[in-house]
Amino acid sequence: MSRSKKVKCGKCGKQIDTDDQFCGYCGEENQSYDPASKKGTGKTAQRNRLQFRVLITVFIIAIVVAAYYAVFVAKLL
């Protein structure tokens, strides 16, 4: 489901999303299309994926340390 604005195709006049690079009816290039404005592309998406991976890695390490403590260190006390 798209939440982008609608514009008229310059060739056929049908309503198309500004996120579409080409008109889905006649194939004309959408003059309002701006690939840089699309969300989640480029370096921002790469940075978000990297941050997510780091967060998951830290979470897994914390679980492993807690499990190690619960199994081995608690028996020694």
Image (tube, rainbow, N blue to C red):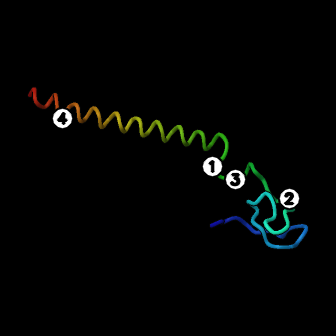
- The residue at which mark 1 appears reads as 40
User: Disc 2 marks which amino acid?
Assistant: Glu
Which image quarter is the C terminus in?
top left
Which sits earlier in the primary sequence, circle 4 or circle 3? 3
Q: Tell me how far mark 4 sits from mark 3, CA to CA.
A: 47 Å
Q: Earlier in the sequence, mark 1 or mark 4?
A: 1
The residue depicted at 13 percent of the width and 31 percent of the height is 74
Question: Which residue is identified by label 3?
Answer: 38
Asked if marks 1 and 2 touch (Cβ < 8 Å), the reply is no
Q: Nearer the viewer, residue 77 or 28?
A: 28
Residue to which mark 2 is pinned: 29
Front one among 53 and 37: 53
Disc 1 to disc 4, how far (Cα)?
Answer: 40 Å
Q: Secondary structure at mark 1?
A: loop
Return the x and y of residue 5 as percentages of the image width and height: 73, 67
Left or right: residue 71 versus residue 36 is left
| Disc 2 residue crowd, few under 14, some 14–19, many 20+, Cα 10 Å | some
Residue at label 4? Answer: 70
User: CB under 8 Å between callouts 4 and 3?
Assistant: no
Image position of 77 with respect to 25: above or below: above
- Residue count near mark 3 (Cα–Cα under 10 Å), binned few <14, some 14–19, many ≥20: few
Q: Nearer the viewer, residue 42 or 24?
A: 24
